[in-house]
Structure formats: C-alpha cells, structure tokens
Amino acid sequence: MTTPHFSGVAVTVDVVVLTIRDDELQVLLVERGIEPFRGMLALPGGFILPDEDAEPAARRELVEETALDGEGLYLEQLRTFATPHRDPRGRVITVAYLAIAPDLPVPAGGTDAHAARWQPVSSLLSGAVALAFDHLEIVEHAVDRARSKLEYTTLATAFCPAVFTMTELRRVYEVVWGVSIDARNFHRKVTNADDFLEPTGERRVLETGRPAALYRRGAARSLFPPMLRAAFPPVPAADPRS
Amino acid sequence: MTTPHFSGVAVTVDVVVLTIRDDELQVLLVERGIEPFRGMLALPGGFILPDEDAEPAARRELVEETALDGEGLYLEQLRTFATPHRDPRGRVITVAYLAIAPDLPVPAGGTDAHAARWQPVSSLLSGAVALAFDHLEIVEHAVDRARSKLEYTTLATAFCPAVFTMTELRRVYEVVWGVSIDARNFHRKVTNADDFLEPTGERRVLETGRPAALYRRGAARSLFPPMLRAAFPPVPAADPRS
DNA sequence: CGACTTCATGTCATGAAGACGATTAGCTAG
DNA sequence: CTAGCTAATCGTCTTCATGACATGAAGTCG
C-alpha cells in the first residue's frame, strides 16, 4: 500500500429493477447489443464516468438504457462484485444497485437503444432464462435483499404507485414472499404501525365490490413491530394428497 | 457503454473491525505512515491486487496492517464508497468491509508496520477524534449495520470468544445498543431460540457469585423471533427531575 | 330489490415479552 | 459451620401482538 494502483481496472454499475407485474415479481433486463454476451439478457448498467459518483451513475444508466424515470425511483446500493474474471474483457468490478418500481407501463423495448423488457424473476432463478456475466448472482442477492427489507422497513410501498389500496399493498408481500396473508390481520397490523400509511380519504371504485380506501406512503422508513415472515404459512406447497 | 474505461481509477478495500473492550464498542485503527493524511488515524485497508477478489483483499490487508487473525473473523461486505474526490490522489473508490472480533489481546501497535490500536467508537462519532478520508462515514455505516444485525441475526456471538457466558452475550447487546436489558428475560429468550447457543456443560467460576454456564455459538445464522430493539428502554436519559 | 363481490371491523385464544420476585450455587468472613 | 455476599437461573403475572375465523358494509349488476 504505497502508491495507488491505477492499473487496468474498470468500474461499472448494474441495476436490478424489481417490480410486480401480473402478480409476479419481475426484473428489468436489456438485450446486449455488443460483445461479450451479445444478444443475451443482462442487467441495465454501464461504466461509471470519471467524475461521477456511483448512485448517479446507476440512475443515469437506467434512464439511458431503459427510459425509466430516474427520479421517483427507490434506489439503494446492494453490493459490489469483484471476482477476478467475472468479465472476459479484463478486470471489471461492478457496484450493484437495487431499485424498486411500481408497475409503470414502461416503454419496454421502446424508446431507446437496447430492447428493455420485464422478465419474471422465477424464470431466472429456475435457470430457464440465462443472464450475461454473473448477473444471475446479482439478481439473487437483490431478491434476497428485497425480501428481507419488507420485514422491517416500509419498502413495500415502493412497489405501489403514489396512491394505492390496502389490497395492493398486501399483494406486494404475498408476491415477493410467495405466501398468502390474511387480509384482516394484515389490515390491522398495517394501520396500527405509525406513519406507515396515510389515508387520503378518497376511495377507489372498481367494477365490482365495496370501494377500497386509498392510501399514500407515510413518513416512516422503518417498520415496527416488523412483519414476521417466518410466521406466515411457508409457501403453500402443491397439494400432494399427503 | 461501448468499450471499458480502463482509465485512471483505483480500487481499495477498507475494513471496520469492531470489538467490545472495557464495556465499550471499539474500532481498530491504524496510524497512516504516508501522505495524504500522514500521521492521522484511518481504517486498515489498501489497494486490491490485480487478480484478487475483494474479500480476500480485505482479509489480507487486515493481517498485513494489524496482525489480526484473518481466519476466525466474521467479515461481510458493507458498502462501496465512490464519491469523486474522496481521495486527493485521484479517482479511488473503496469497498468497505465490516468485521467483528472478540476482545482478543491484539498486538495493537506491536508486530507490524503501522501502529494499530483500538479506539472507542464514541470518540469518533462525537468528533473528538478525526479520521482520514471519509472513514468516519464508513464507520458510521458499519456501526449502523452491526446494530441492525444484532436484531435479526446471531451476529452478537461474533463479539464473544469461542466459549462464553450468558452475561457476556447480553453485554454485547447492551454495549452495542446502548441500552440495558433484563438478564432474566434475555436468558429466557436466547435459550428459547433454536440453535442460537449450544451449552458446553462447563461452568465458569469467577471470584464471586454463582458460576455461569458456558456456551458455544450454535448453528443458527438468523434469529427468530428477532430481538426487538425498539422495545427496550430507549437509552436511559440523564434523569431530568421532571 | 336481491345476488354477488370486495372491503372493513370484531372477537377469541394463544404465545411472546416486559416487570419483578424468589431460589440456587459458588465464594468469603466471622 | 454458618451467615452473608454476589451473580446466575428459574418462575409468575400481566400485557399485548398476532393468527384463526365470522360478520357487517358498500358498491355493481341482473
């Protein structure tokens, strides 16, 4: 540790954008236009600029590659991946970010250079769809992080639009955790937590059923008492006539 | 994002080693022997080698700079800091690590090049002692992480030696959180949690009082139900004769 | 105006957790 | 040997969050 090694190392950012579409946890991917891994799916991301901090770089790449709104988006740093040969081009380390988006009608594959599109996380974890580089590992970390954070933070609201119903919020937990939650107990718990939700007073009238009260995100960032994941029925298994 | 920017960027690792000494949360620091910030206290760390992963680099720097055992040490990645001018020498981003050590009689300032020594975290957070670079910010993140992880993981045992007493474990929570915890309820809760602790059958006889049973770390990594921090008396305030 | 659908609220039993009293197991001093 | 000290461990009571489950409320549609 004497003088800086400004030798050939490059730094990138990669962003795992999670959302819920069609009652499924999905991740935003782009099709690679260049080698290596040309034509394969990968996380949006790219090289950090010489005078740029990591988080702005993540937001910038997101906008450039997927035309996704960089502003209202929840974004947090996930972890840095620095395994020596993770990029065949040379020494490239990446700072991975986790972003959470509501189910916006993203111009997937529309506006920009690369064809951006949503992909169910399950199709990646099962190995049905392959990702470039070590991006599968990054997605796994991101999903783990999101699952944990639902427990003790109010992160779930980041999956919802600015105004949402209790049922929408509950579905976030159900989809991300893969469990089913009793609507009544959930309602009680969430309304008891301070500043988790803020009633708008409005109601949303659907085609059918009683109108649902509308809520906005509250000021609270942490959730106390936490949602206890382990207490819910552990993923309804495919009924094997026991 | 066309071809890699292998321009002048360097990558370092920095390690925040936390321990409990004298009933205080302390962090391991080294005195810088070179510019910039020569003579100032800083986190142990250094440049990552061309063909080295980040975590091994963290372990290596720890051994080189502080002669601390790299093996039995708990180590996890914390976060990457990439603010453009955080290092006056140029573009240097650092991958920060959090390590937890039992109160080993470390050869502080002994064996090696730099004078390594323990410093109470409180003296850093209060601003009484200054750190080089943005290392104060890194320490703050590390302490936050450690405090959170005590809640829902068994990380507390990493502060203890291989064999320890219930009281030692409880002190970890008390010192790191800055609260006082009822010994009886703590005992009940911890022994009820599966695989948190494993009784050795031995007892430790002190100068006074009933001998304490000795425990070893159990296999569990996560702690359920979690320790609920917010439920404890919120830091005994200086009795305002109210 | 009933049938249907979805949201909202209530009750009850269980279990975890905080407060705190009581007992146990070692030592030491008389 | 016994009283007394200290710290660890065990037990009880009460409160409160939570899971299970039933019922009422507010809309649309025929």
Image (tube, coloured by chain):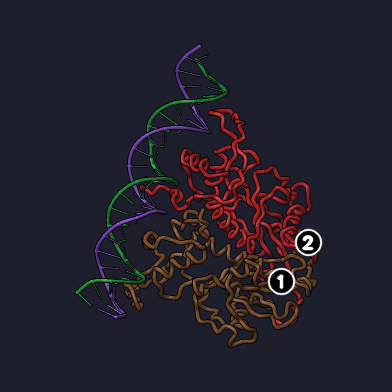
Chain colours: A brown, B red, C green, D purple
Q: Which residue is drawn at 36% across and 77% down?
A: A206
Q: Is mark 2 on a helix, strand or loop?
A: loop
Among the two numbered marks 1 and 2 on one chain, the one whose residue lies closer to the N terminus: 2
Amino acid type shown at disc 2? Met
Decide: marks 1, 2 in contact (CB < 8 A)?
no
Is residue B85 depicted above or below B117 in this figure?
below
Tell me where residue A21 appears, x and y as whole percent: 51, 74
Residue reaching furthest to the bottom: A111
Percent of width and height locating residue A126: 63, 66
Residue A1, disc = 2
Tell me the kind of residue under disc 1: Phe
| Near-viewer residue (B206 or A169) | A169
> Which quarter of the image is occupied by the N terminus of chain B?
bottom right
Where is residue A9 drawn, in percent x and y? Answer: 76, 71
Position above or below: B216 against A159 = above
Question: What chain letter is assigned to the residue under label 2?
Answer: A
Q: What residue is pinned by disc 1?
A: A133
Q: Which residue is drawn at 70% across and 73% down?
A: A132
Which image quadrant for residue B40? bottom right
Report the Cα–Cα distance between label 1 and label 2. 30 Å
The x and y percentages for residue C2 are 23, 71
Looking at the image, residue A87 sits to the left or right of residue A222; the answer is: right
**In the rendered structure, the residue with mark 1 lies on which chain?**
A
